[in-house]
Amino acid sequence: MEFFLQQCVNALQWGSFYALIALGYTLVYGVLRLINFAHGDVFMVGAYLAFFVSTGLLAPEGMFGFSREMVLVLTIPLTMILTSMVGVTLERIAYRPLMRKGAHRLYVVITALMCGLVLENGNLALLGASRRTLPELIEKKVYNFGDIAVTNLKLWVILAAVLVFFALLFIVTKTRMGMAMRAVSWDRFALPLMGIPLEQVIVFTFALGSAIAGLGGLLFAMSYPVLEPYMGAMTGWKAFIAAVVGGIGDIRGAFLGGFLLAFVEVMVAAFLPSTFRDLFAFSILLFILWQRPTGIFGKPLTTKI
Amino acid sequence: MLKHIRVPTLVCAAMLLAAGGAFAAEAPIKIGFPIPLTGEIPKVGESTKFAAELYREEVNAKGGLEVGGKKYPLEFIYENNEAKPETAVNVTLKLITRDNVLAIVGPQSSRQAVPAGATANDNETPMITPWSTNPDATKDRPWVFRAAFLDDFQAPVAANFASKQFEAKTAAVLFEISNDYSKGLADNFRDAWEKKHGKGSLLAYESHGPKDQDFSAQLTKIIKAKPDFIFLPENYSFAALIVPQARDLGYKGPFMGSDAWGSAELMKLCKDTCKGQFFSTHYAAAGAKGATKEFIDKYNKKYGYVPDDVAALTWDAIGIVMESIQKTGKIDGNVRKMRKSIRDNMASIKEYKGITGTMRFENRGDPVKCAVIVEIDQKGDFTFKESVCPQ
């Protein structure tokens, strides 16, 4: 039983990262019907930005004189803002020109794939292949509940994912901007006629999605402190699958899908030989999609987000 | 750079041609080094060349290598293999056919050593690769040797050391399924451990993929099985993730690593968590004694940094070649005959005392030698713990 509970904690932590990335996928898809394949790499950039921000704030001894806690408090918003700027830049230079020219959505998706590769290889060219590690920003504590071990960092990660989910839900359903976002996904062409600034809404969507990826990147770099340029690719793909299984375009779907994928992965590894992990995990997801092609929360022909 | 190498070569070749056999007594002994001076692993090429130059200067300062009562100067020819397999084949062939070297030392990494080994073997020239651990480099090639141990030896070493050091009766393994090195070592370890402690003594045998970052599911499984220690035949970047994650999950026991841990980056990534752990490798610079320490000091004095395992293995590889040349008794003008007797002498070396340990070739290309167990001390240095020898 304790073994199962411990694995649940593991899955909750790992699922939080999937959920944070999947939320970004689903936001952009919900508004633009665009699968932003560069999102996993925006997440990677977020982790690197967290590295540079935190080492920058810590490194010059006595220059700022911040304590580690203070550095963390400053790193969170700075990383989120900087990462959202990366996302907005991508939208501005890669997606918007194509959309304005009325390119088919397929071309924009391919452009997104290429943007991801540009981010990965640009990072490799700029920073080299040597791996980086984030300085320790909070003192790690291990709590033991019987045989179950949890670190304070894991609890923060899970809490952050839950908070982000509710914040997003609030923004999308309760605010004017959220209403505008839903309106974009409803009918993009009628929207400007109603006096809603379409491009501002799109920029806001990208900024929001990338900021969440930045937060995810920071928390990821704190939990798994080995940064390399390709770290976002695989995690990003899996998070995308999680978003699709949950029903892409639906925030609840992305959140749930992220945890579902992590639970399946962890439980397969826990109760079957770990060699089978990805094979079984994705077979199960395939089966879910087979039963519900639109994902768990997806409903065909209704507005998504 | 190239001019430096080639001009004396040409002059010597011309002298040889002019003087013929009568002049052979003063002709230098030529050894070829097809090494990666540029490309992906230039540091490996640099270490090789630095160690070789140190050796050559030391011998030549004494008037040369003594063979059958006469002294012959050493001439080392360095060719750049660009860390590419095809270039390695080309430069090896050039060293053999044009420079008429008596033996080849190199290439270093298996990717170049495996194809270059075929060239040396086909042309009946003795070759010794200091650093390659892939069995294919020497397999079915009577002319090819190596100075490093093989991975099917390293695994039992880890098993024996852990049994003794941790008084371990049970073990667990976590390895990377898509990496031949990691998988091979894990398989060998399983066999060795079960042979030593009986079936069922390996409590967990878990794997992960090449891009994984979270190992909590596998580690929770391993920790539940309560092994006496965890064997991690992993690259250092994975080791730096796995060790802290296991600690977070409440594991308090020791870890045992393999030679892929031996990167300076390990401590940068793993910080304090990896201190106090052990891994098996070729040689340990910190805390070395005797001839090994002498070599490290000489190298450090000349080049300003502590030599890595590549430099140490190169030093030994050259030493093996030199001893084999000395044993031929006299330098024959006939290069083919010389190569044959050098090969035979290498294969029959009873015991060679190198700085990376004592080794012997039982008429095979792979040495029987001891591995070094290294402890990561509280300063983060890799200190010598003990050497473990084949039983």
Image: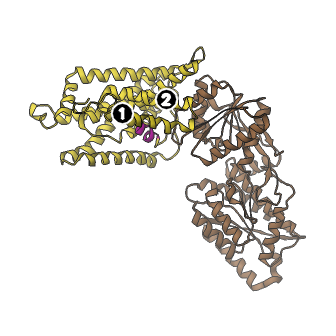
The location of residue B17, given as percent across then percent down, is: 74, 84
The location of residue B78, given as percent across then percent down, is: 66, 65
Residue at image position (57%, 40%) is B237
Q: Separation of disc 1 and disc 2 at Cα?
A: 37 Å
The residue tagged 1 is A291
Front residue of A181 and B193: B193
Q: Amino acid at mark 2?
A: Met
- Where is B339 relative to A221, above or below? below
The tint chain B carries is: brown
**Can the viewer see residue A215?**
no
The residue tagged 2 is A222
Q: Which residues are magenta?
A: A231-238
Q: Amino acid at mark 1?
A: Gln
**Can the viewer see residue B141?**
yes
**Chain of the residue under the numbered disc 2 shown in the image:** A
Front residue of B219 and A227: B219
